[in-house]
Amino acid sequence: NAGVTQTPKFQVLKTGQSMTLQCAQDMNHEYMSWYRQDPGMGLRLIHYSVGAGITDQGEVPNGYNVSRSTTEDFPLRLLSAAPSQTSVYFCASSLIGVGNTIYFGEGSWLTVV
Amino acid sequence: GQQLNQSPQSMFIQEGEDVSMNCTSSSIFNTWLWYKQDPGEGPVLLIALYKAGELTSNGRLTAQFGITRKDSFLNISASIPSDVGIYFCAGQLLGQAGTALIFGKGTTLSVSS
């Protein structure tokens, strides 16, 4: 997991609150993405970015916003948290192109009550 | 959207036994990847496969990229307690921007000594 840093590691939110999960990488990777992991569901892609200023939706984007103002950072925003967003969130990054290794952060455990 | 069917969902084995798990898809992938996730950690890449028919080993692990490009298997020989964890397959599609992966739902491996 070297090079991809996620914060916070644990967070409890009340329904309706907003928060931002931070992700930073120092490997000059063009590609960054956010996944959520739920029991028995594997990892599902929320949003991804192929470079600064470029973002796109993944498989489960509803309820989440992202921005990519720099190559290094890719924050994930929950504008109005819902209990269904209780999950473990992973940020990942890589160089562009097939065959490049994807590096994962250590995860952020989010509970919405 | 694309889906990966990973089986079995869970396995309970004795130390020293061999393990086999597989993934199938209705879509053709250009890359198959196998990850392992330990509790409280992000996924870590075990083996990457880039060519149909490719058979690759990494220590006690062996994985193959199916000829049809729609399936892959992972074998673990002579299992040890530290093999415990969740194993994920992931497929990558040709031409997709960046390296967004589609993940299987995981195989949870338990090893008793």
Image (cartoon, coloured by chain):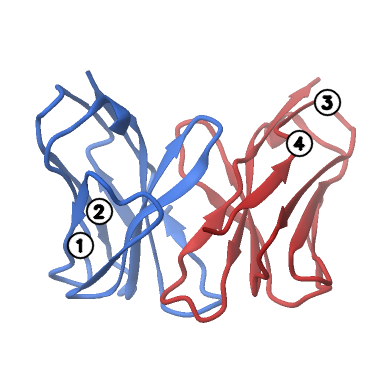
Chain colours: A blue, B red
- Numbered badge on residue B13: 3
- Numbered disc 1: secondary structure: loop
- Numbered badge on residue A73: 1
Lower position in the chain sequence, tag 1 or tag 2: 2
- Identified by mark 3, the residue type is Ile
The reply to whether residue B57 is in sight is yes
Estimate how packed mark 3 is, as few (under 14), some (14 to 19) or many (20 or more) residues with alpha carbons within 10 Å: some
- Numbered badge on residue A23: 2
The CA span between labels 1 and 2 is 6 Å
Estimate how packed mark 1 is, as few (under 14), some (14 to 19) or many (20 or more) residues with alpha carbons within 10 Å: some
Q: Chain of mark 4?
A: B
Q: Are marks 1 and 3 in contact (CB under 8 Å)?
A: no
Lower position in the chain sequence, tag 4 or tag 3: 4
The residue lying toward the viewer, choosing from A99 and B106, is B106
Q: Which residue is mark 4?
A: B8
The CA span between labels 2 and 3 is 37 Å
